């Protein structure tokens, strides 16, 4: 039932949310989450971020988690759009839209999906720093390290850890 | 079987994919990493810390102890940083 899309092009969060609720009288809550490329990484300005992905697996893995969210909460619609390729500061990276009759389910499902996208969807971010003055630690590209805090957030949805619901 | 590499694993090995025919006795993902890391400096560099490397068989996440006998495509990559 959910929509999963991977694309290079920017997306329009408002029109994706509007599309999900079009003609529906049963939806009482829509949560729209957009993840955005920041202008700096730990204080160092960046020029761009490039997202590499595993074609085929990325779609399948996101779809598996959309299905898991649909089993867990009474959702009335889900849209996930994840961009890949080169993304500039201020541009959107990822969109999660969840629709339900009541807000608790829409909020929880959106958080669940984002926590899993961060740790399980096969995407890798590479940051491009601005060329710096001689002697400064800038310029070049680095792969973003996975964060322990993201694993912790994803683990709260595991069976037996339902405190976040 | 086909191997695919992503992110810094791909960069260290120097190619995005390759066909391989591992010898008998290479039964698991962990075995395969050990065998690959003996194929040259670039592989040794990519797999120098196998605990951090994630793997997928036929586009589904697996653990290092997963059997590879029926695999068509095995991918190796760093921990994911999407979203």
Image (cartoon, coloured by chain):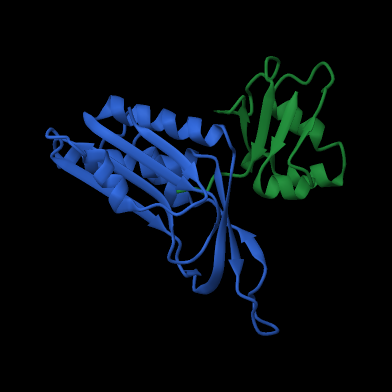
Q: Position of residue A87 (x, y in %)?
A: 52, 59
Tell me what residue is drawn at x 54 percent, y 40 percent: A122
Query: What's the colour of chain B in the image?
Result: green
Instruction: Give the residue drawn at x 62%, y 33%.
Output: B55
Q: In the rendered image, which quarter contains the C terminus of chain A?
A: top left
Asked if residue B83 is positioned above or below residue A161 in the image, the reply reads below
Picture quadrant where residue A137 is located: bottom right
Residue located at (47% from left, 66% from top): A89
* Side of A3 relative to B19 (left or right): left
* Front in this rendered view, residue A29 or B35: A29
Depth order, front residue of A125/A94: A94
| Residue sticking out furthest to the front | A23
Query: Which sits in the foreground, A30 or B46?
Result: A30
For this orientation, the residue located farthest to the right is: B40
Nearest to the observer: residue B28 or residue B10: B10
Is any part of residue B30 visible from this angle?
yes
Residue A158 visible from this viewpoint = no
Colour blue, chain: A
Residue at (54, 70) in percent of width and height: A46
Residue A69 falls in image quadrant: top left
Query: Where residue A61 appears, x then y in whole percent?
Result: 48, 32
Q: Position of residue B11 (x, y in %)?
A: 74, 50
Residue A108 x %, y %: 25, 40
């Amino acid at each position: 039932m959910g929509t999963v899309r991977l694309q290079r092009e920017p997306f329009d969060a408002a029109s994706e949310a509007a599309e999900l609720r079009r003609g529906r009288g049963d939806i009482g809550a829509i949560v729209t989450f957009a993840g955005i490329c920041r202008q700096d990484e730990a204080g160092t300005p960046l020029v761009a971020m490039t997202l590499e992905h595993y074609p085929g697996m990325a779609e399948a893995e996101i779809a598996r988690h959309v299905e898991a969210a649909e089993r867990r909460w009474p959702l009335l619609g889900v849209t996930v759009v994840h961009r890949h390729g080169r993304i500039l500061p201020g541009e959107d990276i990822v969109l999660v839209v969840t629709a339900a009759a009541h807000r608790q389910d829409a909020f929880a499902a959106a958080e669940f999906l984002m926590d899993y996208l961060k740790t399980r969807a096969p995407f890798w971010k590479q940051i491009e720093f601005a060329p710096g003055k001689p002697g400064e630690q800038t310029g070049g590209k680095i792969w973003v390290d996975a964060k322990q805090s993201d694993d912790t957030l994803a683990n709260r949805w595991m069976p037996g850890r339902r405190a976040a619901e | 079987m086909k191997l695919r590499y992503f992110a810094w694993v791909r960069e260290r090995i120097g190619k995005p994919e390759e066909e391989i025919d591992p010898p008998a006795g290479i039964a698991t993902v962990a075995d395969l990493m050990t065998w690959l890391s003996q194929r040259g400096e670039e592989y040794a560099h990519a797999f120098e810390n196998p605990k951090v490397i994630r793997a997928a068989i036929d586009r589904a996440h697996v653990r290092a102890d997963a059997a590879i006998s029926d695999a068509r495509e095995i991918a190796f990559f760093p921990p994911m940083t999407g979203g």
